[in-house]
Image: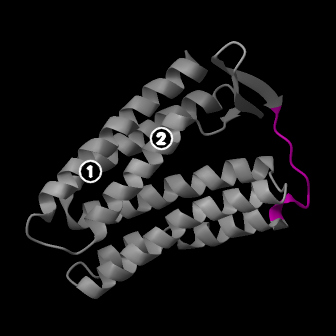
Amino acid sequence: MHLIHIRYDSSREEWQTMDVPFQYNPGDWRKAPNLISYVRLAGSWLPGYLVVTNPHDAQAWWWATGIFMFVAATDVLDGYVARRFNLITDLGKFVDPLVDKLLVLFTLIGLGIVDPWLWLFTAIIAVRELVITLQIRRRSKLVAAIRSGKLKMLSQVVAIIALLVPLEGGWLIVQLALIGHAVFWTVFSWIDYYQRFVR
């Protein structure tokens, strides 16, 4: 497997990609950023589980919201620790985005079971992740996150938080607007990844 590293060449004013071999060292799994990712992975299924098992319990939905926000926010923490203490590993570059994807998909599946109208939103995200992963996997490459991918993740997290928060009234309009925003970045980043790494 190979990694595709992305950097901006200011002299040429363009983004460049570098294809380098994936490297794993036996001690990588116990480095602090990766340990944080494992904790995040362990909690990635909880919001969806709480929603499915307590569909009419507002307190459970608040708990699901809090756990979701914690797991999503610690994505920043493991990245900071890795850069601050020079603990960046190829294993971390693989596990970290995997946790993000599982958190989003597990939670959306749970929400879709409770509110079936969300299945379209879930399907768009799931198909995007599956197709991109398979296309890149066919080339035995692991792609580092690019700007559009990060904005995609952020928009999805914000939309899911809005769906989890048990509010009523005009909140549905806000939810629909944020879902639309997330769908836009999901599709846009899909096209961006395809043009950069697959085409």
The quadrant of the image that shows the N terminus is: top right
Residue 117, x across and y down, in percent? 17, 54
In the figure, is residue 28 to the left or right of 9? right
Determine crowd level at label 2: few under 14, some 14-19, many 20+ residues with C-alpha closer than 10 A.
some
Which residue appears at 36% of the width and 57% of the height?
158
In the figure, is residue 195 to the left or right of 31? left
In the figure, is residue 61 to the left or right of 70? left
The quadrant of the image that shows the C terminus is: top right
Which residue appears at 32% of the width and 55% of the height?
159
Check contact, mark 2 vs mark 1: CB within 8 A. no
Occupied quadrant, residue 140: top right
N-terminal-most mark, 2 or 1:
2
Labelled disc at residue 178: 1
Residue 107 is covered by the magenta coloring = no
| Secondary structure state at the residue bearing disc 1 | helix
Disc tally is 2
Q: Nearer the viewer, mark 2 or mark 1?
A: 1
Labelled disc at residue 129: 2
Occupied quadrant, residue 61: bottom left
Q: How far apart are the alpha carbons under marks 2 and 1? A: 19 Å
Which residue appears at 72% of the width and 15% of the height?
11
Looking at the image, residue 99 lies above or below residue 153 = below
Instruction: Identify the magenta region.
Output: 21-29
Which residue appears at 32% of the width and 49% of the height?
122
In the figure, is residue 139 to the left or right of 124? right
Looking at the image, which residue sits at the far front?
11
Looking at the image, residue 162 lies above or below residue 122 = below
Dominant secondary structure (helix, strand or loop) of the stretch shown in magenta: loop
Looking at the image, residue 114 lies above or below residue 188 = below
Residue 40 in sight in this render: yes
| Secondary structure state at the residue bearing disc 2 | helix
Residue type at tag 1: Leu
